[in-house]
Amino acid sequence: MSGPRTASPSLDRAELAALQPLRPADGSRWRGLVLPIAAVFLWWALSRLDLVNSALLVSPGKVAATAWDQIATGRLWRALAASLAREATGFLIGTAAGLVLGALLGLSALANRIVGPSFNTFKQISLFAWIPLISVWFGLGDVAKVVFLSLAALVPVVVNTCDGIRTAPPALLEVARVYGYTRWQTVTEVILPAALPSIFTGVYLALIYSWLATIGAEYLLVAGRGIGNTLVEGSEHFQMDLVIFGMVVIGLVGWLMNALARRLERRLSRFR
Amino acid sequence: MAAERAAAAIGVGGGLRAAPVFLADRPRLRRLADGLLPWLLPAALLALWVAGAERGWISPQVLPPPLFVYETLRDLAVSGDLWLNVSASLQRVLVGFAAGAFIGLALGSAMGLSRRFEAYVLPTFNALVQIPVLGWLPFVLLIVGIGEPLKYILIAKAAMVPVALNTLQGFRQTPVALREVGQVYGYSRRQQVLEIVLPHAVPTLFTGLRLGFTKAWLSLVVVELVASSEGLGYLIVYGRQLFQLDLVMAAVVVVGAIGYAIDRLLDALEAFAKRRQPGAAP
């Protein structure tokens, strides 16, 4: 291959595969419940017996009470709504820009040669390292957060869109040529459909990345409210119950997004 | 190769094709133009940056001139501060990654080898994995405090997840036919694992290790941004607090350069491992 590698889409696919929860080959469900139940019982017993520093080892009941308090007072919904609105905005902007840039890099060899290597170098900079610079340029508010989230969503979409387009099956391209397709027809009727699964990989990763970036942005650009701020608050006030509650919520939202994306993917593959 | 040719035929992809058409009959010039094209964008950006700084379009407080960033980087290197922080970061990432990779390999192979163990552990593992490193940070912070163990634990966690999942995946994908061959030859369980399952798992395993290292590096920067008093992430935060953007950018450049070097190295290692895979094309 003579051109530069535009990134490591194989690694992206592996990452996506890691996001799909593997099911135990052994179909029994009860075995999976043993460990969590044992852990919660141990937790309860330890907090009950007062063996460990109880300021940190809060009881499961306390966490439940905090959870109820957060839900009943509406604090959870406000935080979640703020976080999700940010996430959606950043995800949409980043994905749209990523699709355009990725398609450009995939379709035009010249653009790929000019922008590709710079993009690869840019991509190597650990995402969160941008936050201090972004905070100087855009402040600590929502603008800075959305810029950061868009950046997080942009990268996987560009990489996978470009890869999907560049690896369109040559046999199909041959057929298009034989039938005398115009370039536009070739792109819309042959290349894009063939690239769709790869593009979806990018968008899927963008959704997950922008959720991680939302937590990161709220954590590092501490201003406003959001579920990341709930964590910071719990951490600063040594409220382990709030921290645990925040973790559970973040995990649940991540899991829901994963499930949603997987369902979409299945529908998409049936549609094709 | 055939793919390249077919793609080039309709003008998609291909490297040399990128050079302008008027150079088509001058291969040497064309190759030169092709080699220079990637530098066009960085050169243009750099020129814009230099010009912007010199003409005073951009305040140095917002974007310090490139020469200033270079000088800061050089000063850091000469005074030894750079090495101090880089070595602190590298030590963290190496220790964390080694621990995470070890646990991931152990957990992944245990789940891959024993269906019973897998049935007990995998659902819990899947649930815990849903919480990102940043979610664990305050939890671990409250328990172990702000010292080195915090960094090791979080980096190890970040590396462990993809390693464990890919190891499990690798152990699962042994071709049934080969497994049957092993049975026909009366292989012991140990032989089965060492001579059939493991060689087939190696490429997937490497992908996991590579992904694990990428995640470890990413987490290192996050953890150092939030809680540290040395290291590259700290350098970035410190520069930001003093509003010394030259320092911030110099540190960001170093983070990018090390990330790039590690990525290339792991890529080469992975290619090497894949070449040695049984059944791979020579």
Image (tube, rainbow, N blue to C red):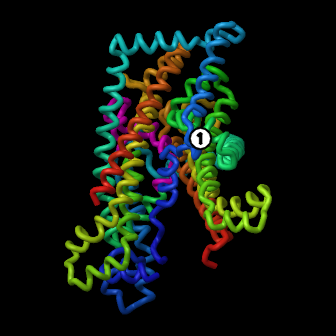
Q: What is the x, y in percent for residue B108? A: 65, 46
Q: Residue at x 56, y 38 (%)?
A: A28
B170 is within the stretch colored magenta: no
Q: Is residue B197 left or right of residue A116?
A: right
Identify the chain of the residue marked 1, using the numbered disc in the image: B
Q: Residue furthest bottom?
A: B25
Which of the image's four quarters has the C terminus of chain B?
Answer: bottom right
Q: Which residue is mark 1?
A: B158
Q: What residue span does the magenta drawing correspond to?
A: A122-150
Which residue is nearer to you in this view: A189 or A123?
A189
Q: Quadrant of residue B236?
A: top right
Q: What is the x, y in percent for residue A189? A: 23, 69
A135 is within the stretch colored magenta: yes
Which residue is nearer to you in this view: B9 or B119?
B119
Q: Is residue B255 left or right of residue A96?
A: right
Can residue A255 be seen by looking at this rendering?
A: yes
Dominant secondary structure, magenta? helix
Secondary structure beneath dot 1 equals helix
Q: Residues within 10 Å of mark 1 (few under 14, many from 20)?
A: many
